[in-house]
Amino acid sequence: MKMPFLNNKQLEKSFHYPEDNIPEHIAIIMDGNGRWARKRGMPRTVGHKEGISAVAKIVRAAVKCKVKVLTLYTFSTENWKRPKPEIEFILRLPKEFLSIYLPDLLSNNVRIEAIGDMESLPAYTREAIQYAIDRTRDNDGLQLNLALNYGSRHEILNAMKGIITDISNAKLSLDELDEQQFSGYLYTAGIKDPDLLIRTGGEKRLSNFLLWQLAYTEFWFTDVLWPDFSEKEFLHALEEYSQRKRRYGGI
Ligand code: FPP
């Protein structure tokens, strides 16, 4: 079954894609899949599956708007607390997503990356992601980061451990350690901090997502549940972002 794909000419005509003041890096907390399904009297997993189509639509919109980096919170370190069948269902989604959309991602010059602790993920998730990373390695369009088994506190703690190890091996000097060097120890090393964070599903919290990286990011919240999140809302977020004045603590 082929779901909405990235080059949908009909949709393209109905939207105005802004060209100025586009955030280079957008991070999204995709929340509300479970409620979307429950509202329809269906199991929560139906909402997660529907979430895949929303991912495809938003990737397509990000490509059209020439966003450079899109980071999607797909599975958090806290999501292990969910019932086992739901965890397994979510962890099978990257493979399902890529089996449908990888050809479109390739033809749209998208490069896939992953952030998070990949080691503890099941082989079917790791292998699907690694295959996509390898296949898209030479693409230089949108960088699509899938945050999988990602938790920001864990990431920061790991960075601290790496730094302490490098200091004790004299590879790093404590006196010279600065914010830029610290960032280099995070999963997001080399990636510009997000300019815009979008959270769907009505909650207004960060849920352990990119705590270091979001220090100066603009936030945009919507009550729309992730499976209903469409290009229209995405472009609305971009429109509001373009009106914001970013001062980074200055005047
Ligand atoms: C949060 O909604 C969503 C998740 C934990 C899973 C996110 C996964 C997807 C959107 C699909 C997979 C995407 C890719 C890129 C393969 P929730 O379950 O917490 O919803 P609720 O707050 O309504 O319960």
Image: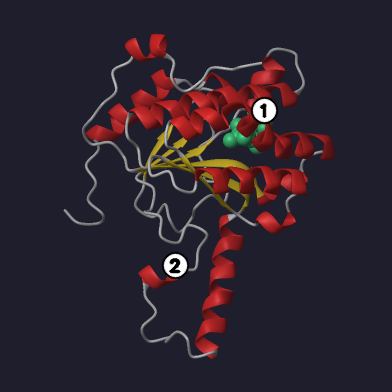
**Mark 1 residue type:** His
Image side of residue 86 versus residue 68, left or right = right
Residue positioned 36% across, 75% down in the render: 178
Name the spot of residue 90 as percent of width and height, x first: 71, 36
Residue 88, picture quadrant: top right
Q: Is residue 107 visible?
A: yes
The answer to whether mark 1 is within 8 Å of ligand 1 is yes
Q: What residue does disc 1 label?
A: 48
**Mark 2 residue type:** Gly
Name the spot of residue 238 as percent of width and height, x first: 32, 30
Q: Earlier in the sequence, mark 1 or mark 2?
A: 1
Q: What residue does disc 2 label?
A: 184
- SS class of the residue under badge 1? helix
- SS class of the residue under badge 2? loop
Q: Is residue 201 visible?
A: no
Residue toward you, 74 or 107: 107
